[in-house]
Amino acid sequence: MNKTVSIHLQGVPFIFEEQAYDRLNTYLQQLTQVLQKEEGSDEIIQDIELRMVELIQQQLTPFKQVVELSVIEQIIEKLGQPEDFSDDSAATSETTSTVQEDSIEKRLFRDGDRAMIGGVCAGVAAYFNVDVVIIRAIYIFTFLTFGIGFLFYIVLWAIIPLAKTSSDKLRMKGQHVNIENMKSELGDAANRIKKGAKEFKSNSGIQSTIGSVLRVISVIIGIWALLFGTGIFVLAIIFFFINPDIIPAQLNGRFMSLQDFGGLLFESSSHESYFYFGIALISIAVVAQSYLFGIRLITQFKASYLKVLTAVFGVTLVVGVVLVSLGGVQIGRSMAIYGEVEKEIATISGPELNIERKSIEGQLIDGFKIKSNGDEGLVTIKNGRVYLSGIELVYSQSNDSLYHIKQINDAQGRTHESALKKARNIRCSYDFLENRMLLETMYSFPARDKFRDQNVKFIISVPRGGKIFYDKQQVYPRMKEESDFPNETFQHGYISSDGSYSNW
């Protein structure tokens, strides 16, 4: 059981343990004796006491209202011993400053005095000696445009230390740690605390209300952070361990999973592995940071190991982003070069060409008539081949009296040779019966070629006076309605997976 003492320090009431009070009183007496020859010593003592008020208030919580001896010892360590404020110390500091004028150790800290959230922007502004408004404007711009502002701020918050002591704040500004600069720094803190102390004494009820509202808001934000982290955790468990078939694409008679889909993007399993490993690291980091952030807001728990964990998971997040970016770069490199191949597949004579959709509709199986074509879904993968839907038609003028039909396949690859090979591997089924072209709306390529923007189109050269029909409707020549050029016709057609036709 310890005896307590009730005191007022610069007008602010505190409850001290007796040992803490004795240590504080001894410190202030020694400081007064050291500074008695200093001009304005009373103001310096007052500034130091106001700084103590600020530091003590930071240590108190709703569950800890008594100032203990350990708190006073920590504050004295931050402020410095009485001899640090003596004239000899000042002279030594000034001499050192003169000799080592170019060796100021400027460090990056978070500035808690000007903080709106965590003091990151204020600390960066102090380090680069620019207006903090500029740094905040840059942060808001990156947050609203590129979407990385939030994560970037969290990472900096985790790895940049807070400027706690006067010497930290001087180093943050690139100033020498000497008595004159410490007086100036303490004076700034004093002005700030004087204003806060006056408001505390005159508007304690208002401050209590505002504090309660802010506390409720912080708890709500903390709960939201915990729920957000839980949601990401559940999604990560589902993705990495359950791997459900959720993509509406046919893979040998079933839907595809996200990992199945990823296998059609990456050329090598190693690229796919570190991409997914990066996703896992990002998920772990986001979940952990959300939990740490929520716990700190709800409980106001400020243990040092929480800061260490925040820094560790901040680094984890950065590593995950790097790995995912490398995976994206590999996909981009595998699609860097465009390749196209062409061949003439038919020459037809006659006044018209009829294009019909090649379909299995109308066939009978066990007495049942088939009414579907079997090409629904985003993509179909069957027996090692990928099936896509949609055929483009391009019309041009023939140089003779015949219809000339050419097939053009194009794809992308890491090199021109690989792109050409992938284009040659594309297959599209068609048949010709006199002046009829039976055309499938699906084309396929080997699954080992991956998704590399494979496409198929047919170039049809039409003789003068010739016509092209699709599904018994004339599609070329067909005049454009409301066109600025009255003789302009559609030059392109597209047959979608359901057989519908569009032109432009």
Image (spheres, rainbow, N blue to C red):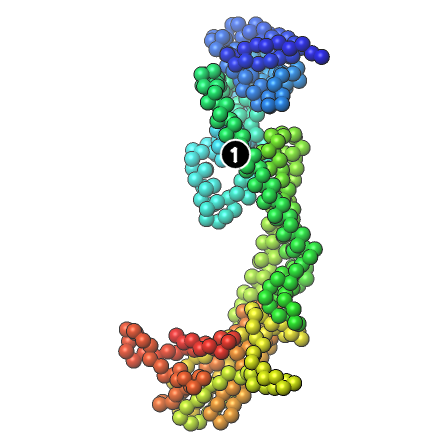
Would you place residue 308 above or below residue 190 in this image? below
Can the viewer see residue 287?
yes
Direction from residue 257 to residue 208 in the image, left or right = left
Q: Residue at x 59, y 10 (%)?
A: 6
Q: Residue furthest front?
A: 367
Question: Looking at the picture, how far across and down is residue 48, in whole percent?
Answer: 53, 14
Q: Along the line of sight, which residue is nearer the eye, 230 or 105?
A: 230
Q: Secondary structure at mark 1?
A: helix
Can the viewer see residue 27?
no
Would you place residue 171 above or below residue 257 in this image? above
Q: Amino acid at mark 1?
A: Ile
Q: Residue at x 67, y 75 (%)?
A: 383
Direction from residue 142 to residue 84 in the image, left or right = right
Would you place residue 14 above or below residue 158 in this image? above
* Residue 61: quadrant of the picture: top right
Question: Looking at the picture, how far across and down is residue 391, in whole percent?
Answer: 50, 77
Which residue is denoted by mark 1 in the rendering? 217
